[in-house]
Amino acid sequence: MRVKRYEAENMATALRIIRDDMGPNAFVLSTRRIKRKDKYGQLKTFVEVSAASDVVQVTGAPDDVSAAHKGSEARELASLQEQVDRLKRELAGLKREQPTKEIKGIQQDLLEIKELVEFATDQWAEESIKEHGPILGALFRRLKNADIDQRIAARLIAITAKELSGSSKVDEKESLKVLFDVMKRQMLTSGPISLLESGPKTVVVIGPTGVGKTTTLAKIAAQYTMLKKKKVGLLTIDTFRIGAVEQLKTYANILELPLRVADTPEQMRQYVADFSDMDLVLIDTGGSSQKDRTKMTELLNFVGGRNDMYYEVHLLLSGASKNRDLVEITREFGRVPTDYVIFTKLDECNSFGGIFNEVVWTQKPVSYLTTGQNVPDDIELAEPGRIVEFVLTNSFRKRAASGERASEGQ
Ligand SMILES: Nc1nc2c(ncn2[C@@H]2O[C@H](COP(=O)(O)OP(=O)(O)O)[C@@H](O)[C@H]2O)c(=O)[nH]1
Ligand SMILES: [Mg+2]
């Protein structure tokens, strides 16, 4: 599925642009009003609309899954889910009032229920496998070996089973093809950073230390200035780490791009305003561990609220991170309103299920994938089929001429 974001002066214009661009089957996912300066420096209200052309949800309880499994396991799951929701509500209430023993008790209950849900989901998948034979069983194990969360794997297999139920010949090849398509529909991607009709597009990259923010920013800057011949300005608020500014300065010099270093949020605003004749302004941020509260607060001071300044935020996550780390990083960095995710270091991944899970859980479209240390070549535009291919083959191969692919569509 392809998700794109559009901006226009009013809703009617936005819908017309969406229909022209995505066709008559496109539908709106979300809308919001944003304020930003137009090319004359006047603060104006725009509508921002996210649209998609095709969607099948794996999150929640999809109808096709429950239809495929109306048995006792499905009912058991529903009842467990109700208990979890009730306990979560109680926990939220208690946290406000009395943070002690009772919370610990409820947390323990939640843990036990989580285990029960996992067990029930396993049984649920087992049922599906029994019903549909060893071919789907092998695919279920393949998904789990690729580090796909088992609840997600169970749902994917259930949907695949349902889609296969109409076909006369169910062999390994056909099952894999259907699973591939089912998985592809779950992946959200955004296409390249889209520029505005008037005024600069401002993009901020955030993420943990060492994830590849500065390198990725340089790759994107190179794509837009070298291949697309756009005017790009660079700005960094990463003044803490010794050498951080130097690293970006080196790229700025090579690409012959202007670079500003902002020490305060006010300075950042001023520099962005100074870049009003650019097409794209890229803002690098400091490396912060998601566990480092002070640094996180500092980041929030700069980019925590959009107020009168409009920018797009891309969260960088290492594809090589463990599932649990990805969840924790996303939760912490989620305090900064995030639009898209970039997965880095695909060349260092041993499995790709974490990327798939992350997209299903967060429902955030992926903008780019980075595939090595080389600037500017090791970046490609995220595509659903590529991500699923990595998961199912458990291997990664660099795409030829990836540099050009990364700038496609503009
Ligand atoms: N293997 C690999 N290394 C990468 C990739 N992207 C960045 N790096 C390396 O990761 C290290 C940290 O990158 P940097 O951009 O400084 O991270 P930052 O702290 O988030 O700004 C550098 O050595 C980069 O060359 C990638 O896609 N693959
Ligand atoms: Mg950096």
Image (tube, grey):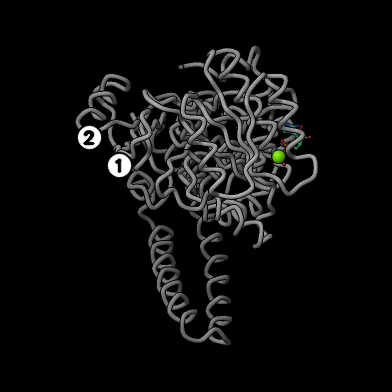
| Location of residue 370 by image quarter | top right
Kindly identify the residue that appears in the image at 66 percent across and 35 percent down.
344
Which of the two discs, 1 and 2, labels the residue nearer the N terminus? 2
Name of the residue lying farthest toward the right: 242
Residue holding disc 1: 31
Looking at the image, residue 51 lies above or below residue 354: above
* Spot occupied by residue 121 in the image (x, y as percentages of width and height): 51, 56
Quadrant position of residue 403: top right
Residue 173 appears anywhere in the view: yes
Q: Nearer the viewer, residue 142 or 189?
A: 189
Q: Secondary structure at mark 2?
A: helix
Q: Nearer the viewer, residue 366 or 173?
A: 366
Q: How many angstroms separate mark 1 from mark 2 (CA)?
A: 9 Å
Whether residues under marks 1 and 2 lie with C-beta atoms below 8 angstroms apart, the answer is: yes
Seen at 58% across and 57% down, the residue is: 332
Q: Is residue 51 above or below residue 232?
A: below
Residue closer to the observer: 398 or 165: 398
Q: Which residue is mark 2?
A: 11
